[in-house]
Image (spheres, grey):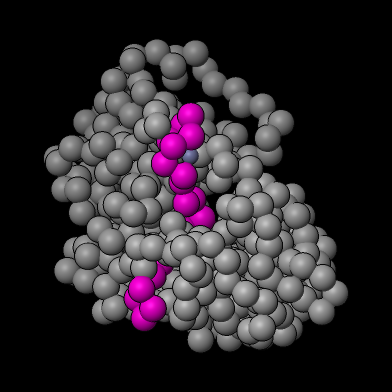
Amino acid sequence: VFHFQAAVLRAPRETISVEQIAVDELRGDDVLVRIKASGLCHTDLEVVDGSVDVPLPAVLGHEGSGVVESLGPAASGVNIGDHVVLSWKPSCGHCFYCVRGQPILCEPTSQAATAGTLLDGSRRLLAHDGPLNHFGFVSSHAEFAVVPARSAIVVPAALPPEIGALIGCGVATGVSAVIRTGELEPDSNVAVIGCGVVGLSAIAGARLAGANVIVAVDPNSTRLALAEGLGATVLVQAGDEIPTAVRNATAGRGADLVIEAVGRSDVFSQAIEAARPGGKVVLLGKVAADARISLPWSALMGERQIRRSSYGGARPLRDFPFLAQMYLAGRLDLDSLITSRHRLDGINQAFDSVRAGTEIRAVVTH
Ligand SMILES: [Zn+2]
Ligand SMILES: [Zn+2]
């Protein structure tokens, strides 16, 4: 039996308790990872605040990085001592969706994630009062995590752990939305609506891909200043009419690619209207599942290609090492995304500051 500290959420809107939990034995392809950094992604906060429903009690955290400590009997593809970024989407490779090239929709992975288990349908984490649910196979708000081998993506040891954590969710989503789902061509004009971690990563990705004009839209001037530092060439304080502002910055046509990273029904509509005829729109934000969206019909005219994506088309095995390499080569500037560091026992205060909206990304480090 192996003991370590973990942040346990027992019910929505309750204080998270940092307590000693146990893992009895590694099974199958389990990988035990010593966590070095764990980002407080907004999805965690939605669970804490009760707007997203997952099986509780659970150890949250789905944006983590660390070092492989030990391996289950069938774990392959990783070695003890490897530096890894954890993935909340460890696709199986052979289900209906995986064989059709849509691993983000992997059926067994989605079922296990919804149930709060690992891929074999069981749980590894034990609190004093019973088993704990896993969160997206990662559960990184802890000193250690037990993940399936497919969720442990090896990256260079030189990658700072905090940057590794962000690559696991927010950065992969934003950069991939531009270069994978958006298939951005050099010399294109891009508009990014919403400058949190995902939007700012999309801006960094647009610069990496050789975009010409990069319009950043956000109501907050501090975030717009960060956007400028990452490569935005036109700053638009939201509240201005977004489609008009984007058209003004793109010879009157609208952007070749619009990335929406806000998650508000009225912004979805404005994002689509900000794209040029024939342009692409990637909607990354989310609203309540039963929310209605209304659009002027003209927004759907003109051969626009509209895609909704939850991970921007990122494929962890391909993209985590790629993003790490780009960071290490100085081509993807991600340091400014980390706005505060916390100890594990300060996680409730860290979530308070995420809730207050003052963070780009708060990170728990060990
Ligand atoms: Zn996330
Ligand atoms: Zn699958």
Q: Within the image, what quadrant is residue 133 found in?
A: bottom right
Magenta residue check for 356? no
Name the foreground residue: 136 vs 290. Answer: 136
Residue at image coords 66%, 83%: 1
Name the foreground residue: 190 vs 312. Answer: 312
Name the foreground residue: 297 vs 65. Answer: 65
Q: Is residue 330 left or right of residue 68?
A: left
Number of callouts in the render?
Answer: 0
Residue at image coords 42%, 41%: 93
Vertical placement of residue 213 versus 248, above or below: below
Magenta residue check for 84? yes
Q: Residue furthest right?
A: 129
- Whole-percent x and y of residue 151? 46, 59
**Which residues fall within the magenta stretch?**
79-98
- Whole-percent x and y of residue 161? 39, 77
Vertical placement of residue 290 versus 286, above or below: above
Q: Within the image, what quadrant is residue 189 found in?
A: top left
Residue at image coords 75%, 55%: 55
Q: Is residue 23 left or right of residue 263?
A: right
- Whole-percent x and y of residue 310? 49, 43
